[in-house]
Every structure is written in C-alpha cells, then in structure tokens.
Image (cartoon, helix red, strand yellow):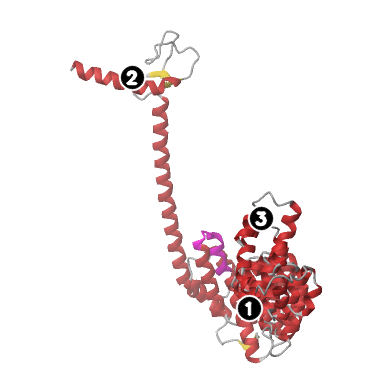
Amino acid sequence: MKIYAELETDPCEVIKLFSNTLSLITSPSTSHSHFSQFPPNHFQPDLEDGIPALIQYLVEVRRRINDNKAFKLAQREQLPQIIDTTLLKCYLHTNDAFVSPLLRLNNCHLEESEIILLEYEKYSDLIILYKYKGLHTKALDFLKKQAKQKGSPMFGHDNSIRYLQGLGKENMDIIFQYSTWILEDNPKEALQIFTEDVDEVEQLPRDRILDFLQRKFKHLVIPYLEHVINVWDDTNTLNHDTLIHEYQDKIKHSTGDSAIQIRSKLLLFLKQSNHYSPASVLARMPHDGLHDEKIIVLSKLNKHEQVLGIYVNTLGDVQKAIEYCDHVYQNNLQTKEELAANQVHFLLLRLLISTDSTPNKRLGGLESTAKSHLDVALDLMEGNPTKISALGALHLLPDDVPLSRVVPYLRHALNNSMYEKRKAQLMSSLLYADHLQHQEQRILEQSQWVLITENDVCLVCKKRFGHSAFVRHPNGDVIHYTCQEKYVKYKLNTSSFQRRRL
C-alpha cells in the first residue's frame, strides 16, 4: 500500500484489487450497484487480510485529496464518495465503531450505503445517513415503521421524538406532520418534541406550535404554555393571556378536586405574572364567578373601587376590604404615590355609607351581621384617622350620626392636621433660610469684578489680552484662557524663587 501511495496510483485501481473481498461483504443483491462495477481480479488471492491496510491507505488518500492540486476537480468531487463508500464496507467488516463518524462526513453513496446498512441491520447508522443527506421524511417514515414492530431495536417513540427534536425551526412542517401520530399515541411523552430543554427545541416558533396544539391537541396547550412560561421564562403577552383563558375554560368544565387545583394555579399565575393584559383577561371573566381572580386583575388595573365593591356587596366580607385598603396604602407609600394611598380608605368609607345596611340583607349569599355598615364606617374612620380626609369624611356622614361617635376620629384628625401644619411651617422656615443664604452668596459673588484695559498683559505670556478669552483666578491673577497649563508652571517657578530669596 505504501508503494501505491508513493506512486500516487489511482485509488479506483487499488480498490479493484479488493473487489472479490468487498463483494463478499455485501449480499449478492449489491452486485449490480454503482460501486460494484469494478471487475473481479482473477489473478489475486483472497485479500481479506489486507482490508486493514486498505483502510489505512484510503484514509491517507482522502486526507491528500483536498490538499493535493494534482487531483483534478472532477476527481476531488467523485473520489471522496468512492473512498468513503468503500471505507463503509470495510468498517462494517472490521470495526463498526467508525461507521457513524464516517456517515456524518456525508460523502457516502446513498443507494449503496442504504443497501449495505439495511443488510447489516445498522438501523441507527441508516438514520444518520438519511439525516445528513437531508432525507428527513425518509428517516421518519423508517422510524415510524420500526416503532411499531415489536422486537425491533427502534421499537417505541423515543427515536422518533429525538429525531424531531433535532430538526430545527426550518423544518416545522415536517415536525408537525410526523409528531401527530406520536401525540395521538402518547401525548405526555410526545410533548417533549416541543418542550425538551435543548437549543433546537427552545428556538422553535412558539406561536406556530401554539396554533398547532390549539387546533389538534387542545388538551396539551396548558402543559405546553406552563413549560414555556415557567421554565423558559417566556414574557410574550399572547402566551400569558392564552394560558389564563385556558385555565378559565378548564375550570368551567371541571368539578371537585380538579377544579380546585386548576383554580389555585390560576390565582397564583394572576398574582405572579406581570406580562398578561389585565383588560383583556377581565373582559373574558364571567360576571357571576371567579371573584377572587377578578379582584387580582382589577387591582392590577388600579380599579380599587370595583375591588371594594366585590368585597362588600358581592362577598359580604368587609374585613377583607379593610385588609385590601391597608395593603394598597402600604404599597403606594413605598412607591411614593401618597395621593392614591390617601384615597383608598376614603373609597371604602364612601362605599360603606352609601350601601344599604338593612339587617338580614343577603350579601353574596351571606347574611349581614347585626353591626351596620355605618358602624363599620365609623370604626374605619376612628382606626385610620391619618388615612381619611376629615373634610371629605364629614361630608359623607349622615346628619343623624351622634357627635360623640366621631369625637375620637376628629381628635386624631385635628392632632394630625396640627402636626402636618407645624411640619410644613418648619420646612418653610428652613427653605426660606436656605434661600437667604443663597441670596447672600449670590450678592457676594456679583460684587467681585475685574477691569481689563488695553495695556494689561497676561502674567504668563506677557502679551496683551485684546479680544482673547481670559481667566481670572481666585487670587486675582488674570491670564489668557490658553495659558492655563503654563500658569501652573509659572506659579511653581515663582514660589521656588521666593523660597530661595528667603
């Protein structure tokens, strides 16, 4: 083989020497194939023992093909196919561990390689051949056939799922076509085609996948979106809105523990997500249900009065309404929205006073307590004197409310008003003192001036100023603007000279 390499013998002539041996590697059915065209060599003995040497020779020739310009362009295009197909036969006969890497080079002749791989039952390698030749439909048809044959090494869905996961977004139509039968057989396992944590799957167009699932496999929309949002941190508003709508639809058609579980998911998602459209979600909510969910959405829209209306008039839970006001008040203080913070308790007060508080009235299916809403409103005023405007509250109260009932509130409110007044006066005095200080500083600065005549010269360059820009230093020195750097050296030299004189 070294002699053939040194003489640069045509590799096809060398391969002819092994035609008998190579024909034994494949079945008789391959004798009419393109790569069995070499005539048998009747003058050579069985060269089976020379297969390793042939492998070594072909590997070396393949390495030299692209580097050596002695090979013609046609040879550089055809020889890799002939060499790699021959190597495939040799590897199958000696060491099949090299088959997969060889096929990934994508030089092997398709029909010849397909036949020999089928006869050796190298199904995994056959799939590699199809994949690197771009024959995805052929590979998936073969996988589907093998998946349904018991005893086949490729029985089941796993191989098809893995193949589909690696196709990428440019093959979406193929993915949809060949994922259908797997989704029908095993939906939970097949969903991994669209949710596996690999780059090729994560980059698939989610809008197309969502549309596909909604049309054909609606029961998989929720688990798909949960993975996309919770695992991949998707922030697309459409996906968040769709998941909420799917939760709502499932609650309608569920009962018992299933409905409770889905509703818990919906409540948690509404609280945690900041990427859905509250207005869109609210528009699709039922008028006579999902009150807790509606409260969360209305709160995100800052429609506090409607939230309080649900608590008081629908759910009949005034205590929850008070807790909600306290929560909004604290949040608004943290975001420095003081005006909004001071309004929410007033909204509840107005709602309580305006609501008919006749005893035994049904409120959201619950009987009102003996304590009227007016009493609750007065307690609210007394407990939150700094959070409710005294002027607005007094205008809301009915005329028949005893003065003694509002004395504690008024006392706290007046004390708070006096405190705020003193604080404002103190702040005003401090600001005025600061203003006077700045005025004094301004007058002092404006009192300083410099007179430049046509005879004055720069201390540094000793030239007249003329119309050039100049700079006045705090010590009174006036120099050209362009002489500032030299001025530093000038001052250093002057100081040094004065020290020497001393």
- Identify the residue shown where x is 66% and y is 68%: 87
Question: Which residue lies most toward the top here?
Answer: 455
Decide if residue 401 is in sight here: no
**Image quadrant in which you'd find residue 240:** bottom right
Say if 375 sits above or below 500 in the image: below
Task: Indicate which disc residue 87 carries.
Answer: none
Looking at numbered disc 1 in the image, what kind of residue is underneath it? Leu
Q: Residue at x 69, y 80 (%)?
A: 120
Please tell me in which quadrant of the rendered image residue 126 appears. Answer: bottom right
Q: Main secondary structure of the magenta part?
A: helix
The image quarter containing residue 420 is bottom left
Residue 433 x/y as whole percent: 39, 41
Looking at the rendering, the stretch of residues picked out in magenta corresponds to 333-346
**What residue is at 64 percent from the left and 72 percent from the top?**
99
The correct choice, above or below, for 143 with respect to 410 in the image is below
Question: Which residue matches tag 1?
Answer: 266
Residue 170 in percent (x, y) is at 74, 64
For mark 2, does the 10 Å Cα neighbourhood hold few (<14), some (14 to 19), or many (20 or more) residues?
some
Image quarter in which the N terminus is found: bottom right
Give the mark nearer the N terminus: 3 vs 1: 3
Q: CA distance from mark 2 to mark 1?
A: 77 Å
Measure the C-alpha gap from mark 3 to mark 1.
Answer: 74 Å
Closer to viewer: mark 3 or mark 1: 3
Residue 485 drawn above or below residue 198: above
> Tag 3, which secondary structure?
loop
Frontmost of labels 2 and 1 is 2
Residue furthest toward the right? 32
Q: Which residue is mark 2?
A: 490
User: Of the residues under marks 2 and 3, which one precedes in the sequence?
Assistant: 3
